[in-house]
Image: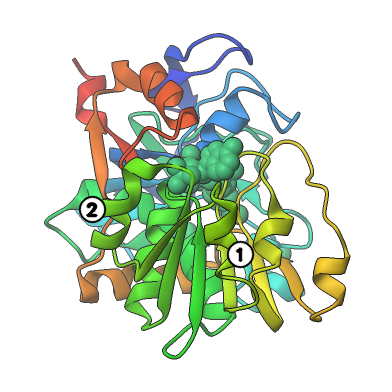
């Protein structure tokens, strides 16, 4: 077995604390990765605090992983020792169902294996990226071409692909008016991508303090979503809206901003279901849809796109002993715009 250490949650209401555990020895197609950087996703907080009611403890969160390959199994063909790689939200899937066969492993019909908090095909619990190393089948490992700003690449593995995928799926591009709701980890990546794809982008935020940043990140307009008059001025004018908000909020006020036949894509996953007035969907034949992360092929495509365009996340780098403070600040929407843990601080 491979020794690993990191930080784990032990209950819904206690802080993360140092934790040692073991990972499997690499099988033929496994890659062993020494973790350099680990992003802090709001899903880590929902999970550790059992807000989705499926937590298994001890839980080592983290699914925005950048690291260096330290060993490979005998049949690994895509990676060598020393390569810089990324690992995201899933580490396995059945590989044969219609979704897997269509490069949409995230929708695996038997259930993809999450990077942490579930049992894998060998019956072992998966432990995530707030740790020293990880062992992953090479199919779920990505090549990282960007070399200069690796900490800013980590959030692409979840926040990046989760926003890139629906924007691509719904063909966001020039001559489209696109809304991004919530300027957090996902939102700021959605804003960067929608702007990069050539859309006219309107950022919705509850935080007046983020207006200048939203414009710097590519927003053509910024609307304070609590301002009813400002919202009314945008009525029935959007081709597409991407909602990244992590808490319950007024979705009807946003649905009313879509044109006829336009689409609302939900990627935020608050713990309580919203109340939706169906009239706001019916009368303009509006669509409501959802999306989770992206498949392995699309994740690599997104990483290559970002390397080519120089897109990384705006981050605050922290040492791992600051993780509990970071969780508190994410919940207060007080992060610009993603915390990333410098995993070298785990050794200190
Ligand atoms: P985050 O960094 O905390 O960003 C969420 C943003 O939502 C906040 O910055 C804030 O933006 C806004 N917000 C928070 N509370 C609000 C409220 N009560 N009303 C209105 N707006 C509010 O979180 P994240 O990491 O981007 O994740 C966002 C959500 O996506 C989470 O629920 C997470 O679990 C989910 N997620 C889903 C997927 C997927 O595959 N679908 C992947 C990753 C994460 P402003 O300050 O601008 O208002
Ligand atoms: Zn995530
Ligand atoms: Zn499958």
Report, in whole angstroms, how far the alpha carbon at label 2 lies from the one at label 1.
Answer: 56 Å
How many dots with numbers?
A: 2
Nearer to us in this view, 311 or 101: 311
Which quarter of the rendered picture does the C terminus lie within? top left
- Compared with 181, 340 (above or below) is above
Outermost residue on the left side: it is: 148
For marks 2 and 1 on the same chain, the one whose residue lies earlier in the sequence: 2
Could you tell whether 120 is left or right of 171 in the image?
Answer: right
Does the residue tagged 2 have its C-beta within 8 Å of any atom of ligand 2? no
Q: Crowding near pointer 1: few (<14 within 10 Å), some, many (20+)?
A: few
Q: Nearer the viewer, residue 28 or 61?
A: 61
Where residue 44 sits: x, y (%)? Answer: 52, 34
Residue under label 2, please give it.
Answer: 81
User: Mark on residue 232?
Assistant: 1
Residue 187 appears left or right of 290: left
- Label 1 residue SS: helix
Query: For mark 2, does the 10 Å Cα neighbourhood hold few (<14), some (14 to 19), or many (20 or more) residues?
Result: few
Ligand 3 is located in which of the four quadrants?
bottom right
Quarter occupied by residue 288: bottom right
Q: Which color scheme does this rendered protein use?
A: rainbow
41 up-or-down from 5: above or below? below
Q: Secondary structure at mark 2?
A: loop
Quarter of the image that includes the N terminus: top left
Instruction: Give the residue drawn at x 41%, y 89%.
Output: 174
Q: Quadrant of residue 107?
A: bottom right
Q: Residue at x 50, y 74 (%)?
A: 178
Q: Give coordinates of residue 319: x percent, y percent.
A: 24, 23
Q: Which residue occupies the extreme bottom position in the image?
A: 175
**What's the mark number on residue 295?**
none
**Residue 75 visible in the snapshot:** no
């Amino acid at each position: 077995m491979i020794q690993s250490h990191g930080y784990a949650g032990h209950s819904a209401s206690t802080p993360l604390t140092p934790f040692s555990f073991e990972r499997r020895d690499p099988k033929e197609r496994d890659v062993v990765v020494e973790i350099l950087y680990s992003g802090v996703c709001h899903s880590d907080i929902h999970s550790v605090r059992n807000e989705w009611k499926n937590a298994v403890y001890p839980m080592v969160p983290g699914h925005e992983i950048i690291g260096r390959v330290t060993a490979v199994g005998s049949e690994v063909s895509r990676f060598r020792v020393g390569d810089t790689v990324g690992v995201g939200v899933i580490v396995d899937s059945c590989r044969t169902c219609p979704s897997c066969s269509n490069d949409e492993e995230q929708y695996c019909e038997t259930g993809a294996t999450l990077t942490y908090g579930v049992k894998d095909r060998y019956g072992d619990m998966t432990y995530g990226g707030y740790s020293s190393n990880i062992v992953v089948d090479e199919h779920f490992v990505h090549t990282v071409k960007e070399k200069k700003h690796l900490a800013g690449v980590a959030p692409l593995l979840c926040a990046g692909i989760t926003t890139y995928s629906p924007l691509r799926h719904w063909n966001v591009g020039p001559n489209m008016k696109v809304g991004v709701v919530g300027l957090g980890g996902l939102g700021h990546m959605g804003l960067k991508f929608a702007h990069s794809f050539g859309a006219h982008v309107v950022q919705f935020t509850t935080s007046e303090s983020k207006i200048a940043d939203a414009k710097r990140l590519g927003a053509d307009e910024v609307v304070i979503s609590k301002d009813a008059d400002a919202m009314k001025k945008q009525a029935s004018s959007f081709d597409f809206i991407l909602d990244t908000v992590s808490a319950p909020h007024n979705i009807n006020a946003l649905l009313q901003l879509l044109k006829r036949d336009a689409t609302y894509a939900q990627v935020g996953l608050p713990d309580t279901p919203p109340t939706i007035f169906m009239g706001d969907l019916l009368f303009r034949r509006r669509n409501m849809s959802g999306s989770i992360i992206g498949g392995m092929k699309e994740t690599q495509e997104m990483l290559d796109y970002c390397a080519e365009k120089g897109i990384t996340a705006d981050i605050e780098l922290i040492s791992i002993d600051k993780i509990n403070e970071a969780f508190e600040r994410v919940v207060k929407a007080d992060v610009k715009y993603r915390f990333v843990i410098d995993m070298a601080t785990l050794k200190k």
